[in-house]
Amino acid sequence: MPQSPSEQALTPDRIRANFFSKLKQPLVCEDIFDTLTDTVFFVKDHLGRYVVVNQTLADRLGAKSKQELIGRTVLQLFPESLAENFAMMDKEVLIEGKQVNDRLQLHLFRNRRPGWSLLHRHPVYSENDKIIGLIGLAKDLHAPNESADDYKVLAKVIDHIQRNYSKPLKVPELAEMAGMSPYQFDQRVRKIFYLSPGQFLNKTRIDHACFMLTNSDAPISDVAFDCGYADQSAFTRQFRQTTGMTPRVYRQEHEHHRH
């Protein structure tokens, strides 16, 4: 998505004005998204430049105001490990017209620390049905209320997953353990964790992999095996898709935690 010289010279206000003048449907009450402290909200133009952001995103990026982010891209604002994944996701939407829904991935939380989020991105169209941008959300994942009745019903299965994530666990078998149909199990897990059973299992494995990479010198092939992956390449592919980094780079960036 290269910028022409004329586009590079545009001010943030002009970038916003150009974008909104082409919208098929105008955005309404964008300021209401400033009230969502656990949700990042944004709109980008066809070059992936921010034209709307909420205060939560500005706070997490350490900006003095939302205006500082207008006209800039993820590659200019986020750590490289996260930015590359976000930029690739933007291209899926802006070039291919795909929708991204409930994608589990690391995002930036307060103080620029990484945290788990569910990401959404949808294309935005002009009056002649041309993709001119995208609109997106990143919703923080919170720890479940373990004292709630819904959690207690699944406590045995959740404990089983957390103790046996290195094994080839299958959702139908986990559902049977919970005394539910696969559909009922799926709905209950989503209600508690806001994740599908498969996403919850993946998150459990990646969390443990992050811990091992940060706190041990175990070979990456051993980390892959201990976290339930059949081979190192499958593990590396999943780890990079979820965290934005290869296991080796993640270990290098977190070496200071071990000293």
Image: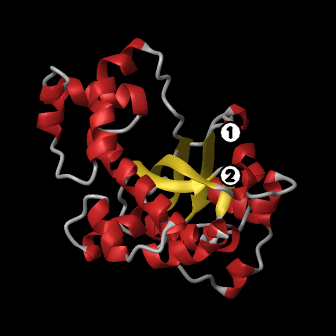
Q: Residue at x 69, y 36 (%)?
A: 37
Mark 2, secondary structure of its residue: strand
Distance (Cα) linking label 1 and label 2? 8 Å
The outermost residue toward the top is: 149
Residue 6: x and y, percent?
Answer: 71, 82
Left or right of residue 112, residue 198 in this image: left
**CB under 8 Å between callouts 1 and 2?**
yes
The image shows residue 227, relative to residue 140, as above or below, that is: below
Q: Amino acid at mark 1?
A: Glu
The image shows residue 164, relative to residue 51, as above or below, that is: above
Answer whether residue 78 is visible to the viewer in this image: yes
Judging by the rendered image, the residue that carries numbered circle 1 is: 30
How is colour applied across the structure in the image? secondary structure
Left or right of residue 216, residue 182 in this image: left
The image shows residue 83, relative to residue 161, as above or below, that is: below
Residue 141: x and y, percent?
Answer: 51, 39
The outermost residue toward the bottom is: 5
Residue 8: x and y, percent?
Answer: 72, 80
**Few, some or many residues within 10 Å of mark 1 (<14, 14–19, 20+):** few
The outermost residue toward the right is: 64
Q: Residue at x 64, y 35 (%)?
A: 28
Location of the C terminus by quadrant is: bottom right
Q: Amino acid at mark 2?
A: Val
Q: Residue at x 44, y 57 (%)?
A: 128
Answer whether residue 101 is visible to the viewer in this image: no
Q: Nearer the viewer, residue 237 or 165?
A: 165
Q: Residue at x 38, y 25 (%)?
A: 191
**Disc number at residue 186?**
none
Q: Disc 1 or 2, which lies upstream in sequence?
A: 1
Judging by the rendered image, the residue that carries numbered circle 2 is: 52
Q: Nearer the viewer, residue 50 or 202?
A: 202
